[in-house]
Image (cartoon, helix red, strand yellow):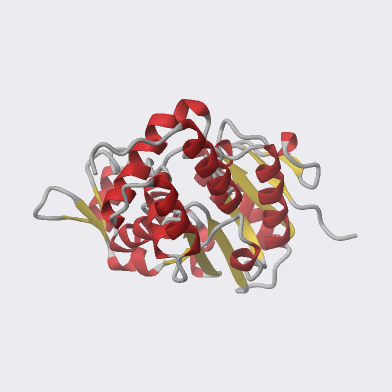
Amino acid sequence: MTDIVITEEDFRRFREFFYRKTGILFEDSKRYFVDKRLVERMIASGYASFNHYFTFMRFQASGAELQALTNIMTVNETYFFREEYHFKCLVQSILPELTQTKPPGSLIRIWSIPSSSGEEPYSIALYLTEYWSGIDHWDVELISSDIDTDIIHRARQGKYSPRAIQYVPPDLLQTHFVPTADGEYQISDDMRQAVEFTRVNLNEPTDTRSYRGFDVIFCRNLLIYFDDFSRRQAAGVFFDALNPGAFICLGHSESMSRISAMFKVRKFPEAIVYQKPEKR
């Protein structure tokens, strides 16, 4: 079983299949990464032949093996307060503008995707709690989604290494985290209850069609793994998910202007973000 070989043709067949399913395209430079994880799942499933495994994985009625394979093929490396300027922009510019046109006390909906292991959505929750003066006057719903079911489970647990929380201010660390016996830190129950985690594949319309009525979307450092076609598809999903006048934040190396003309650029003092135009 340890002598399993993934051929060039095997790699290309899998790459095309995975791209169709997820929108993620593996470059040739990722060949070793892909082969290693394919072999890992083949051994776990009891298959020595790629063709037999590939057939099993594609046509398994439950879809469990495809999900297991997706979980180990996606990258989940992040930390609290990453690209913090977006969180500052949220509380200092975006929310003050949005609340000017909403009835007092109405619902504000925020979507963070991908959730990874929870650092981004919990950072949003911390920022809203600690730095937004309107938190006591507005109802906020914070939803965070990922394609990886294992990582969603970790996010719900809310346990983090010292590296993951290294940029959390000491006062927030003391207030909202509890040291654990194994040297990690668990975020408070209040913060965990503030985020609803869901499994979503952006490339699957049946997953995304119910995601509507959002005021802010954080989708940072995901679209860099997509090709141009998949990025345009994702932009369409986000456009449909947002209310008119709502905002989306992308990663520092991503630009909605190069993906879609549907959004307009907004330059706030803290960050550049993108806005769905108001209805006319």
Q: Is residue 252 visible?
A: yes
Q: What residue sits 40% from the left and 53% below the top?
A: 53
Pick the residue in front: 66 or 146. 66
Q: Nearer the viewer, residue 222 or 195?
A: 222
Q: Position of residue 30 (x, y in %)?
A: 45, 30
User: Is residue 127 at all visible to an observer of this figure?
Assistant: no
Q: Quadrant of the C terminus?
A: bottom right
* Vertical placement of residue 105 versus 20, above or below: below
**Residue 229 lies in quadrant:** top right
- In the rendered image, residue 24, in percent from the top left (x then y), is placed at 55, 43
Q: Tell me where residue 116 appears, x and y as whole percent.
A: 41, 51
User: Where is 157 relative to 184, above or below?
Assistant: below
Residue depicted at 53% across the width and 37% down the height: 12
Residue 149 is situated, as x and y percent measured from the top left of the image, at: 39, 60
Residue sitting nearer the eye, 2 or 65: 2
Left or right of 206, for residue 265: right
User: Front-most of 53 and 109?
Assistant: 53
Residue 86, quarter of the rendered image: top right
